[in-house]
Amino acid sequence: MEDITIDTPFSLTGKLALITGGGTGIGLAIAHCMVQAGARVVITGRREPPLQEAVAELNQTGEHAFYLTNDVTDLGGLEALVETIEATHGPIHILVNNAGINMKKPALEVSDDDFNRIIQTNLNAVFALTRTCARRMVERQSGSIIMISSMAAYYGIDRVAAYGASKSAVEGMVKILASEWSGKNVRVNAIAPGFIETAMSRTAFNSDPDRRDRAMRRTPMAKFGKPADIGYAAVFLASEAARYITGASLPVDGGNSIGF
Ligand code: NDP
């Protein structure tokens, strides 16, 4: 039997992670967890101030984190983004497609522009950046790609037609990409968060106070998740501990996925 040790397989020492939307909420917590696991991280987002603050926080114990302002919906700029990161910091081992936007509107009020904006951010950009990073990962025969999906991919949650469609498509893509790159040691997985306390969920709950109560009733563990709950799962999926896991979607949702 091979030697089994618990510490080492969960370590991300020597790895570089690119985390989109890493300046706030879930992305920032993923960055903190990955840095604690030994990784260096590059975080991106459209606004500079949250990224600057995040990097200052992450670098309190050394130079672990870097940021670049970037809009993932500018698909033509993604090749240059990845090239710049790799030229400056070395190969990207881990890609976390976390940047995402939501919009709560009854389906009959969703315009084509609304729909396209969500799909461009949550789906088209995810594919384009994944393809850009995976070209290099496949060549190097090493990589772990994590998509931040949502339980809206699985359930009929009202007023999120575009968002749910984008996340369902990402879940489908995970299986196909995992299959295509399975022989190249590039793993592709998703995390499907339940209700996690961040700016995004606070905006949704503030615009509809009943929604918070309904969400709580649908959560068997009777509490909302913390961003770090997603960070811990991301460390696991990125690490050698998950070396035999690809094409999976891991619900981190206090039991929402048990059923409504
Ligand atoms: P936040 O709004 O805090 O984070 C979203 C991040 O994405 C921000 O840092 C934002 O930065 C960045 N972002 C948005 N659009 C773009 C863009 N075009 N280019 C680059 N960066 C962008 O929300 P959460 O942390 O809650 O969400 C993170 C992910 O988790 C999303 O994919 C979301 O769908 C998913 N999720 C969240 C749940 C929750 O309950 N909170 C539940 C299920 C899934 P900036 O605005 O500066 O660009």
Image (cartoon, grey):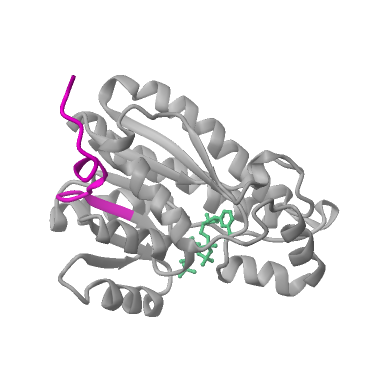
> Residue 211, percent across and down?
78, 64
Which residue lies at the image location 20% right of the left edge and 65% below the top edge?
64
35 falls in the magenta region: no
- Where on the picture, by quarter, is residue 89? bottom left
**Residue 112 shown left or right of residue 62 in the figure:** right
* Farthest residue, direction right: 108
Q: Chief secondary structure of the magenta span?
A: loop
Q: Is residue 133 left or right of residue 88?
A: right
Q: Does the segment drawn in magenta span residue 7?
A: yes
Q: Quadrant of residue 22?
A: bottom left
| Above or below 140: residue 216 | below
What is the quadrant of the C terminus in the image?
A: top right
Tell whether 248 sits left or right of 138: right
The quadrant of the image that shows the N terminus is top left
Query: Bounds of the magenta span?
Result: 1-18
Count of labels in the image: 0
Closer to the camera in the image, 30 or 23: 30
Rendering coords of residue 68 (x, y %) = 30, 66
Please state which of residues 45 and 95 is positioned toward the viewer in this rendering: 95
Q: In this view, does 106 lie to the left or right of 227?
A: right
Q: Which residue corresponds to the image point at 19% horizontal and 49% vertical from the top-left? A: 15
Nearer to me, 178 or 218: 218
**Is 117 drawn above or below residue 57 in the view shown?**
above
